[in-house]
Image (cartoon, rainbow, N blue to C red):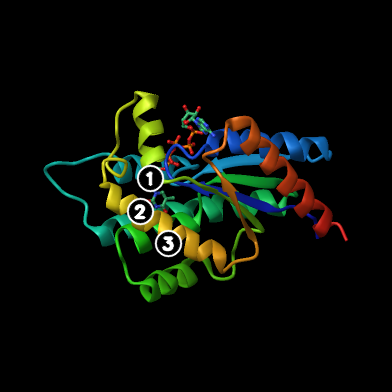
Amino acid sequence: MNNSRFIVVEGLEGAGKTCAIKQVITTLRSYGITDVVVTREPGGTPLAEKLRKIIIDSAEDDVITEYTELLLLYAARVQLVESVIKPALKRGYWVVSDRHDLSSQAYQGGGRGINKKLLKTIRDAVLGNFYPDFTIYLDLPPTKSRDRVLMRGSKIDRIEAESLLFFQRTRARYQELVADNPSIVTIDAKQPLEQCSAAIHDHIVQWLSSNSQ
Ligand code: T5A
């Protein structure tokens, strides 16, 4: 047995997941936890990175259906969980991931409106009882998310090009799921970066101390 843990950072585009992950690692390091594997979804293995490209790129000649998108996301997730995350946890490494299953519940369940029962059936069939130990959800209004994506100046991908309404449904579903799950904490991502980082640090410290008893 070891005490490795799986931590996930979630939120809309531009919520600050990249910065949040850096803060999680810094805080873990201050507690002597240095064996950390960082990964992302979709992606994180050679095959899952290829799937990521298919998922986020636009293909005008062959529009991706919502079920195709969903199954590609789960294919990438299973590949990552089985070939990277579980082996790392088994070796005693902590794993910090930029997105995991909550993204599918929010984007595909909320944004796309895919039936929640179907999502649960697929999740349970391919992931079984594998869940994150702790999730940080960075809550940001879709209008702010859009501003930050546009400020980034890089190409807008297929999902980022969705309507404001799509992201409003996605955020609403995130908020519902978070309210239902005590292993998820919400951070107001409208705050300046320093305040977000301080809040993340405090939540990780609190969670680490409640887990060490
Ligand atoms: N997807 C993914 C699904 O639909 N279903 C799924 O199951 C999964 C897993 C790819 C896409 O796939 C979708 C969701 C996505 O559309 P991704 O690669 O994680 O997912 O893409 P993004 O979320 O688009 O990644 P971003 O890099 O845009 O978001 P981050 O990491 O949250 O944002 P970050 O940290 O790079 O910050 C973006 C900008 O905002 C600024 C930063 O400095 C940066 O310039 N910023 C702030 N500015 C002011 N105040 C703050 N608090 C700030 N925080 C960040």
Q: For the residues marked 1 and 3, what is the alpha-carbon distance in whole angstroms?
A: 13 Å
Q: Residues within 10 Å of mark 2 (few under 14, many from 20)?
A: some
Q: Residue at x 59, y 63 (%)?
A: 131
Instruction: Pinpoint residue 7: horizontal percent, then vertical percent.
Output: 64, 50
Instruction: Pinpoint residue 21: horizontal percent, then vertical percent.
Output: 61, 38
Question: Is disc 3's CB within 8 Å of ligand 1?
Answer: no
Question: Is disc 1's CB within 8 Å of ligand 1?
Answer: no
Labels 2 and 3: the sequence-earlier one: 2
Residue 78 visible within the image? no
Q: Residues within 10 Å of mark 1 (few under 14, many from 20)?
A: many
The reply, left or right, for residue 177 in relation to residue 136 is left
- Which secondary structure, mark 3? helix
- Which secondary structure, mark 2? helix
Location of residue 74 by image quarter? bottom left
Location of residue 128 by image quarter? bottom right
Residue where numbered disc 3 is placed = 173
The reply, left or right, for residue 41 in relation to residue 137 is left
